[in-house]
Amino acid sequence: EAQLVESGGGLVRPGGSLRLSCAVSGINLNVYSIGWFRQAPGKEREGVSCLRSSDGRAFYVDSVKDRFTIHRDRAENTVYLQMDSLRPEDTATYYCATKYGGTWYCPAHEYSTWGQGTQVTVSS
């Protein structure tokens, strides 16, 4: 059985930080790629950061480069998204998801197993 559970969202002021967690069960992350996605009201779901299963290479969407970092803790089977220098435009529901194999980027439409999401709100 495959299960992804996100946590760590909340309300933060602009310039602040949050760390999101994705607890993974029943999925071999040596075979499945995993990533973080977000969806704001009225906008399409967007790939934020993904780890490719084949080599562990990380992808970041341009808008979060140098601000967000994806990290996998293999002992805990948990994937984190460290978010620094947060901006109001980062406000969204954040999801983690997996797909078999991998790609060089972070295509939401190719990911098949999803968590329920955690809300991030950046506001003063």
Image (cartoon, rainbow, N blue to C red):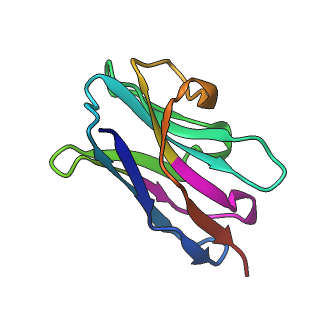
State the count of labels.
0
Residue 85 visible in the snapshot: no
Please say if 63 is above or below 119.
above
> Whole-percent x and y of residue 66?
54, 47
Please check the rendered image and state whether residue 85 is part of the magenta-colored stretch, yes or no. yes
Q: Quadrant of residue 123?
A: bottom right
Q: Is residue 63 left or right of residue 31?
A: right
> Whole-percent x and y of residue 121?
66, 70
Q: Residue at x 49, y 18 (%)?
A: 103
Q: Of all residues shown, which one is farthest toward the bottom?
A: 124
Please say if 77 is above or below 16.
above
Quarter of the picture holding the C terminus: bottom right
Please check the rendered image and state whether residue 121 is part of the magenta-colored stretch, yes or no. no
Q: Residue at x 60, y 76 (%)?
A: 12
Query: Which stretch is magenta?
Result: 80-95
Q: Of all residues shown, which one is farthest toward the front?
A: 1
Query: Between 67 and 103, which is closer to the camera in this rendering?
Result: 103
Q: Is residue 1 left or right of residue 43?
A: left
Residue 112 visible in the snapshot: yes
Please say if 19 is above or below 55.
below
Q: Residue at x 56, y 23 (%)?
A: 110
Q: Is residue 22 left or right of residue 9?
A: left
> Whole-percent x and y of residue 122?
68, 71
Please say if 113 is above or below 69.
above
> Whole-percent x and y of residue 38?
63, 49
Q: Of all residues shown, which one is farthest toward the left?
A: 75
Quarter of the picture holding the N terminus: top left
Q: Residue at x 19, y 52 (%)?
A: 76
